[in-house]
Image (cartoon, helix red, strand yellow):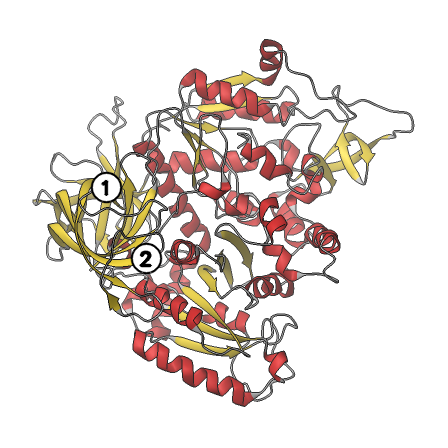
């Protein structure tokens, strides 16, 4: 409706009938992502969508449904379960998979740790984030996936800003930033050698705010932890970390109950909450628009370790 | 609110990174933690207070060597527009990276150092902009602070560049004097250059019309994927999913499927599962046809009364992007949007000097970053338009059959 009103105005101004048809920025982003999804389905034999229960992968599933409607999504949803997930995200995952009638494959980091005799991370907030890579690579091997679709965005982080939409990984899942294929126009080259696979990022060109605005426009349901709720947290280095069985309490740690919401949803041990009273999408969007700190800076504990943390993980096979 | 995609081009010391940093910083698109990280890095490098150029430095390898390896994409927005910047590095592999970054751009900012004026690199960037038909050019004459904000210096550079633009046929060129370092004419009007009557850079970027860059007169559509749910209630559903490359399609349109040449009509149109009366570029849509025809990925559905060219042999401009040189007579996969065809480079006619636009004889193999005129023969017919007429249906890539690398950008002539 809005578009029509605006178009009429434009038509009068420019006196050109061709101006009547135009897409706003969210429609343009959606069209681009749908195009990418269809390229994946056509170019690969066994793609899989990496689904975490977070807002970015929820948006991915929504876009994939649109891309293949009225058919169903022609690939499975894969969740690499660290065992440190929020229950709300897991419940959402199961409900979503059932709703879209997709095959859900879950592989647990816990099992990889046992099978490969890996060392559990230690420390106050032991993060299995790094270990996910092992489980992911095993899962790719197990199902012979040739493309893994992820919800990474280029605005998130410096290493991501340089990655292609079709990102070729070698036998070991490694990303080589110096040997990326040029990606021109809207032409995606998904040809690979045996053993290689491609990570595809259909929402590369979306920003955090684009995602939120799209969720609102499309009325997409989210796990409840994205909205304000009461939670027991530990205040650590100015960040609020959820109290959970995976966190080691030390002397002097104060466990307090605060009204919080999550801006990004990862593991309980490496995602921080933000203090907030935003209970609706509009309120969340208002807060994010006014936010003075980036998504990763505010909520990702693991990226703070070194300046090049993401770059290192990607080179080793991370999403 | 719409989207403007632009690329910044400049030589190594023209202040490209500083300009991008300044745009992000002054438009308040940089957040506190990013700024803190920047301060930390600036200290690491002992480079004074905040080095805005560092904002665009990505990888550790790059920071260590003080260079940029690859095209990086930056995002910012104002209430008017979302911006996507392709930030391509200014050194050795420049042509390759610039072509990559420029392929989707609506606009290019050509940076000129006010002290140097129009130099060889300026010409090269402009030639690439003209080859790739970037619709809008902004010539940003930077470092005005170092020439005492002199109007004469600015005017002389404008005169010099106008000659280049004329030679290249660049017809939408805007000039602006700036100081990226000090923020003059980036977001706010400069107080040191009252003689400049135009808009600051950000306003130029917000106002440049982009809807006119999309061709809505020549309907082109390529099938990406055939949707066949094969369920009880959708037993006969057969939808051709693809992107409207250009033009508009309406229900009932008489269409021809190419290269087969079969005629039919449009029975139904859908966008994301919803039925619509018409579809237009750049929508992703689904077309259902009146007749059962054998159509597969890569086939074109066009209006019967407005058809592209169909041929097995095409003249092209090739921009070579691979370290491994081109070998005439070698076979490559040609990917034209979603259509993959085996092809052979029959003949290389001449090399285009990207600094002078002069045609030169080709000696030996065509190497990385070289642009040549060539003839390509394809194993099955190509359905295309010239790049000049229709950017989105006039471009392709070549893929090496063994390494699967993307080795060339192809512009149909």
Local secondary structure at mark 2: loop
In the picture of the structure, the residue carrying the numbered disc 1 is B332
Q: Nearer the viewer, residue A209 or A204?
A: A204
Tell me which corner region of the image, top left, top right, bottom left or bottom right, holds residue B202. bottom right
Quarter of the image with the C terminus of chain B is bottom left
Residue A104 coordinates in the image, percent (x, y): 46, 20
Q: Mark 2 and mark 1 in contact? Answer it, CB < 8 Å.
A: no
Q: Is residue A144 visible?
A: yes
Residue extending farthest front: B364
Neighbours of disc 2 within 10 Å: few (<14), some (14-19), many (20+): some
Query: Residue at (45%, 21%) from the top-left corner?
Result: A140
Query: Residue at (67%, 49%) from the top-left corner?
Result: A287
Q: Which mark is residue B174?
A: none
User: Mark 2 belongs to which subunit?
Assistant: B
Residue B229 coordinates in the image, percent (x, y): 28, 27
In the picture of the structure, the residue carrying the numbered disc 2 is B370
User: Mark 1 belongs to which subunit?
Assistant: B
Tell me which corner region of the image, top left, top right, bottom left or bottom right, holds residue A14. bottom left
Query: Residue at (39%, 65%) from the top-left corner?
Result: B210
Q: Nearer the viewer, residue B172 or B242?
A: B172
Neighbours of disc 1 within 10 Å: few (<14), some (14-19), many (20+): many
């Amino acid at each position: 409706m809005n578009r029509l009103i605006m178009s009429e105005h434009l038509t009068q101004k420019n006196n050109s009938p061709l101006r009547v048809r135009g897409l706003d920025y969210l429609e343009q982003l959606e069209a681009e992502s749908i195009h990418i999804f269809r390229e994946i389905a056509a170019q690969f034999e066994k793609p899989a969508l990496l689904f975490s229960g977070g807002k970015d992968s929820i948006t991915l599933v929504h876009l994939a449904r649109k891309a293949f409607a009225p058919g169903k999504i022609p690939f499975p949803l894969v969740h690499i379960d660290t065992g440190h997930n929020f229950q709300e995200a897991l419940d959402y995952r199961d409900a979503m998979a059932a709703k879209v009638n997709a095959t859900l494959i879950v592989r647990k980091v816990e099992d990889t740790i046992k099978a490969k005799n890996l060392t559990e991370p230690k420390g106050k907030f032991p993060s299995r984030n790094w270990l996910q890579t092992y489980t992911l690579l095993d899962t790719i091997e197990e199902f012979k996936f040739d493309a893994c679709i992820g919800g990474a965005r280029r605005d998130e982080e410096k290493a991501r800003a340089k990655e292609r939409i079709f990102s070729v990984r070698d036998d070991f899942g490694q990303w080589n930033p110096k040997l990326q294929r040029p990606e021109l126009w809207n032409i995606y080259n998904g040809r690979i050698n045996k053993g290689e696979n491609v990570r595809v990022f259909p929402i590369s060109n979306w920003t955090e705010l684009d995602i939120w605005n799209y969720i609102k426009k499309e009325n997409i349901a989210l796990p409840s932890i994205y909205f304000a709720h009461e939670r027991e947290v530990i205040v650590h280095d100015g960040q609020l970390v959820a109290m959970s069985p995976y966190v080691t309490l030390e002397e002097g740690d104060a466990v307090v109950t605060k009204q919080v919401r999550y801006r990004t949803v990862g593991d309980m041990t490496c995602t921080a909450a933000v203090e907030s009273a935003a209970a609706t999408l509009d309120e969340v969007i208002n807060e994010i628009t006014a936010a003075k700190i980036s998504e990763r800076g505010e909520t990702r504990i693991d990226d703070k370790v070194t300046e090049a943390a993401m770059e290192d993980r990607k080179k080793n096979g991370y999403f | 609110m719409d989207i403007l995609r632009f690329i910044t081009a400049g030589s190594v010391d023209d202040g490209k990174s500083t300009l991008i940093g300044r745009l992000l910083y002054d438009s308040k698109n940089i957040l506190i933690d990013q700024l803190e990280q920047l301060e930390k890095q600036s200290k690491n490098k002992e480079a004074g207070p905040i080095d805005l150029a560092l904002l665009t430095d990505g990888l550790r390898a790059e920071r260590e060597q003080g260079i940029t390896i690859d095209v990086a994409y930056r995002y910012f927005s104002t209430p008017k527009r979302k911006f996507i910047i392709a930030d391509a590095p200014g050194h050795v592999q420049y042509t390759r990276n610039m072509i990559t970054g420029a392929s989707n751009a609506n606009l290019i900012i050509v940076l000129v150092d006010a002290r140097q004026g129009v130099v060889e690199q300026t010409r090269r960037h402009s030639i690439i902009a003209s080859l790739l038909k970037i619709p809008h050019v902004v010539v940003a004459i930077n470092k005005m602070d170092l020439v005492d904000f002199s109007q004469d210096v600015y005017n002389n550079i404008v005169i010099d560049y106008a000659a280049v633009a004329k030679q290249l046929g660049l017809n939408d060129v805007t000039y602006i004097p700036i100081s990226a370092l000090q923020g003059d004419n980036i977001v706010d009007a400069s107080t040191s250059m009252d003689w400049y009557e135009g808009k600051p850079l950000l306003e130029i970027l917000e106002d440049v019309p982009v809807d006119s860059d999309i061709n809505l007169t020549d309907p082109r559509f390529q099938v990406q994927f055939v949707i066949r749910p094969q369920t009880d209630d959708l037993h006969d559903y057969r939808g051709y999913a693809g992107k409207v490359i250009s033009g508009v399609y309406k229900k009932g349109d008489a269409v021809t499927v190419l290269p087969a040449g079969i005629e039919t009509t449009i029975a139904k149109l859908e966008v994301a599962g919803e039925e619509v009366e018409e579809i237009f570029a750049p929508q992703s849509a689904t077309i259902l046809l009146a007749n059962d025809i054998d159509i597969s990925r890569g086939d074109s559905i066009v209006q019967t009364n407005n058809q592209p060219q169909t041929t097995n042999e095409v003249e092209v401009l090739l921009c070579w992007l691979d370290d491994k040189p081109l070998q005439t007579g070698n076979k490559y996969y040609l990917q034209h949007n979603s259509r993959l065809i085996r092809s052979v480079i029959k003949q290389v006619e001449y090399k285009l000097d990207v600094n002078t636009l002069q045609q030169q004889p080709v000696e030996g193999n065509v190497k990385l970053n070289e642009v040549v005129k060539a003839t390509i023969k394809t194993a099955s017919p190509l359905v295309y338009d010239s790049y000049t007429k229709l950017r989105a249906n006039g471009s392709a890539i070549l893929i090496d059959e063994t390494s699967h690398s993307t080795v060339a950008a192809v512009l149909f002539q």
